[in-house]
Amino acid sequence: MHWLWVFIVGLIVGIVAKFLTPGRDPGGFIITGLIGIAGSLLATWAGQNVFHMYAPGESAGFIASVVGAVVLLLIYHWVFKNKAS
């Protein structure tokens, strides 16, 4: 049940990040959820190890997760833009 909840929240985070990020994303339902989950993991890691905002075992909040997903989407756009050139 935990992983279902993680995917649902990741999907919501991914959708919000897609709306906030300029450009066209070819990813579908699964990719959106995975980007949201990865964004949350990135925000949690950065918050614990780089910015020292979260204690060990504490996860990032919704806004930080969206920021992490936007960062990943921008990297995605940059990588695939350079490959198309």
Image (cartoon, rainbow, N blue to C red):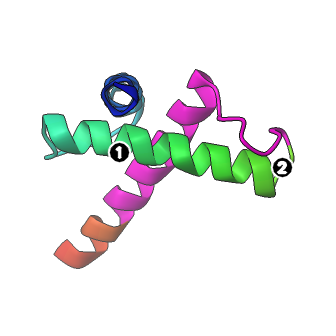
Q: Earlier in the sequence, mark 2 or mark 1?
A: 1
Splitting the image into 4 quarters, where does residue 76 fall?
bottom left
x%, y% of residue 55? 83, 40
Residue plotted at (63% across, 32% down) = 64
**Across the whole image, how many numbered discs are drawn on residues?**
2
Residue at 23%, 77% (x, y): give it. Answer: 83
- Looking at the rendered structure, which numbered label has been put on residue 51? 2
Which type of secondary structure does the marked residue at label 1 adopt? helix
Residue at horizontal 51%, vertical 32%? 66
Relative to 85, say whether 23 is above or below.
above
At 42% from the left and 28% from the top, the residue drawn is: 20
Task: Give the side of residue 67 with respect to residue 81, left or right.
Answer: right
Magenta region, residue range: 53-78
Instruction: Tell me if I can see residue 24 in this picture.
Output: no
Q: Identify the residue under disc 1.
A: 35
Q: Outermost residue, front direction?
A: 1
Q: Nearer the viewer, residue 1 or 84?
A: 1
- The quadrant in which residue 57 appears is top right
Instruction: Look at the image and say whether residue 64 sits in the magenta stretch.
Output: yes
